[in-house]
Amino acid sequence: MLLAACSDVELPASQAGSSLNELVSKANVQQKLTQRGFEWGAPAFIRIFKEENILEVWLEREQGEYALFQQYPICTYSGDLGPKKREGDKQSPEGFYAFGMRHLNPNSRYHLSFNLNYPNAYDKAHGYTGSYLMVHGDCVSVGCYAMGNRQIEEIYTLVGSALQHGQPFVRVHAFPFRMSEENLARHQFSPHINFWRMLKPGYDAFERNHKPPVIEVVDGLYQLR
């Protein structure tokens, strides 16, 4: 039954951050933040790379640019490279997402979780379906990105503290791989190549200035604002 679906019940925002203080001491995040020159509650940004099995957490520094806090190994994700399109396809999403405090679940059946807020405007414009697509612990996944429990404790604490300190939402950019021309050329015959090329400007924008770009959906396409 655990493998049947990545499903959780979302909590009210007041409950979503309720156990954060316990997680702080458990994950020992404060010491790492101080050692690496970050402030507690710094705004957070997440990037996911399927092919590398990597989740990156970036945090904002005082001057407004984001710096890499840490890379975390993804324990497992579902499906292959490519976007999620329908409920039950057991595919982990790719694209540009954002979640807020209400999407955090400290009482998740998968140790801890946050919902990626799929489907987004792009997914809806294309009729894609699915629900409860998350980043969570317990190292099992059917459509989600599953982390080890110690890793999700630290990630959850970082994004939770950012949201508690006023960040309205945390952006998550989920890619099939690092969006270099070389990697795109390796996958040039994939049926997803046009979708991936549409993701590349968002990837490139962050690579240039280390500030999460604002991305909108216009006429069913991702576009930089």
Image (tube, helix red, strand yellow):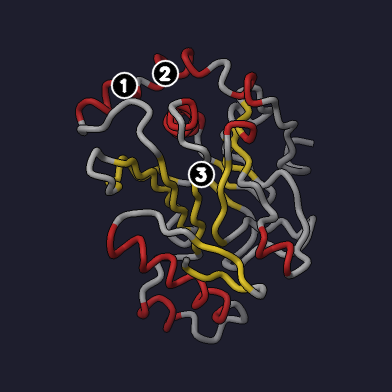
Discs 3/1, front? 1
CB contact under 8 Å: marks 3 and 2? no
Number of numbered discs on residues: 3
Tell me the residue that label 1 is attached to.
Answer: 30
- In the rendered image, the vertical position of residue 21 relative to residue 178, given as above or below: above
Instruction: In this rendered view, identify the residue nearer to me: 152 or 214.
Output: 214
State yes or no: discs 1 and 2 in contact (Cβ < 8 Å): yes
Instruction: Check disc 1 and give the amino acid type.
Output: Gln
Precedes in sequence: disc 3 or disc 2:
2
Q: Which mark is residue 24?
A: 2
The answer to which quarter of the image holds residue 203 is bottom left
Position above or below: 89 against 139: below
Q: Amino acid at mark 2?
A: Val
Residue 112: % across, % down? 58, 29
Residue at image location 55% in from the left, 16% down from the top: 19
Q: Nearer the viewer, mark 3 or mark 2?
A: 2
Task: State how far apart marks 1 and 2 are (Cα).
Answer: 7 Å
Label 1 neighbour load within 10 Å: few <14, some 14-19, many 20+: some
Q: Residue 95, how many percent across, how many down?
A: 56, 61
According to the image, label 3 marks what residue?
Answer: 75
The Cα–Cα distance between marks 3 and 1, rounded to whole angstroms, is: 24 Å
Q: Secondary structure at mark 1?
A: helix
Which one is in front, 60 or 58?
60
Q: How far from the left and from the top, in percent, is residue 220?
A: 66, 73
> What kind of element bears circle 2?
helix
Quadrant in the picture for residue 201: bottom left
Lower position in the chain sequence, tag 1 or tag 2: 2
Of callouts 3 and 1, which one flags the residue occurring earlier in the amino acid sequence?
1
Q: Residue at x 35, y 45 (%)?
A: 58
